Image: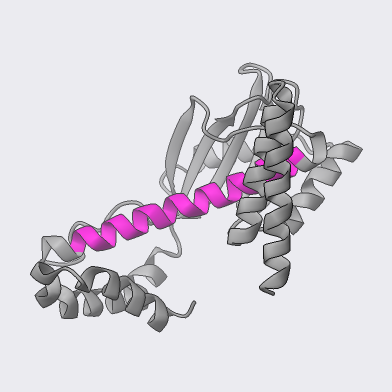
Amino acid sequence: MGYDKFKSKFVNDLSQFENIKAKIPLLKSTLDRVVEKELPYRDSYKSFQIRNITNSESLKINCNLPYLMCKYSSKKKCVLVGTLAPAWSSGWKDISKDSFVSDQIKCFFHFANQYIYRGYQINLIGAIALTYGKSCDFRGNELSQYQLPYCNSEYIAFRNDIPTTRNKRNHMLERYLELINSFDPFVNKILHYYIRSLSLQEDGYIEEAITAADNAVDVIFQAIKQR
């Protein structure tokens, strides 16, 4: 989707509300300013998130890719995943003198930031499912967030602590990570159903696991038909 199409959809979704129609021109011009000036300025800033993956006690894995990295923590007995995303989650309060416009920009880019984080994290749990046949979830009980370059030391320490040795299955995991793109809605759905199937199977719900696997296959056929 190009920017003009995105802007049209973004604005049209809001313009249906009668009480804010007068604010639409300002919202459009502010969006233009954000895309033309603010986002390029923020290119030199990143947000770094660390969280633990559930059901990963037995996974001695590691990877070190440009925007996604993980390592097994012997201390915490789980896999920790580090993810880089654009620094979009904050700093929008004064983007406009109109609080409504600022709030719309703030909400959109906050969720866009979370979408990018989760996309990379879903890539990882999808690759784990395909490589190890395990259902994991990135929504564990640990979450740390750092703004770069202000917290470069935490980011560098995490990255430098990732082992460089890889076994055969770890190489396979990284190969899947090169191929999987969960930002594609079809891929996202397929992974959801496949991981759900593994989870149900692990819990002994075989019939439900088969149904979830069938749903994954259905989405594959839908994707083939539409492309």
As drawn, 54 above or below 85? above
Query: Residue at the spot x=19%, y=62% of the render?
Result: 102
Residue 84 falls left or right of residue 208: left
Camera-side residue of 11 and 213 = 213
Magenta segment includes 115: yes
Residue at the (30%, 79%) spot, across then down:
32
Per the picture, the main secondary structure of the magenta-coloured stretch is helix
As drawn, 24 above or below 152: below
| Any part of residue 64 in sight | no
Relative side of 145 to 218, left or right: left
- Percent across and percent down for residue 21 are 13, 75
- State whether residue 16 appears in this view: yes
**Quadrant position of the C terminus in the picture:** bottom right
From the viewer's perspective, is residue 129 above or below residue 60? below
How many circles with numbers are drawn on the protein? 0
The percent coordinates of residue 55 (x first, y second) are 65, 24
Q: Which stretch did the figure color magenta?
A: 102-129
Q: Position of residue 133 (x, y in %)?
A: 79, 34
Of 121 and 193, the residue lying toward us: 193
Specify whether residue 171 is painted magenta. Answer: no
Where is residue 9? Give x, y as percent.
35, 75
In-front residue for pair 189/175: 189
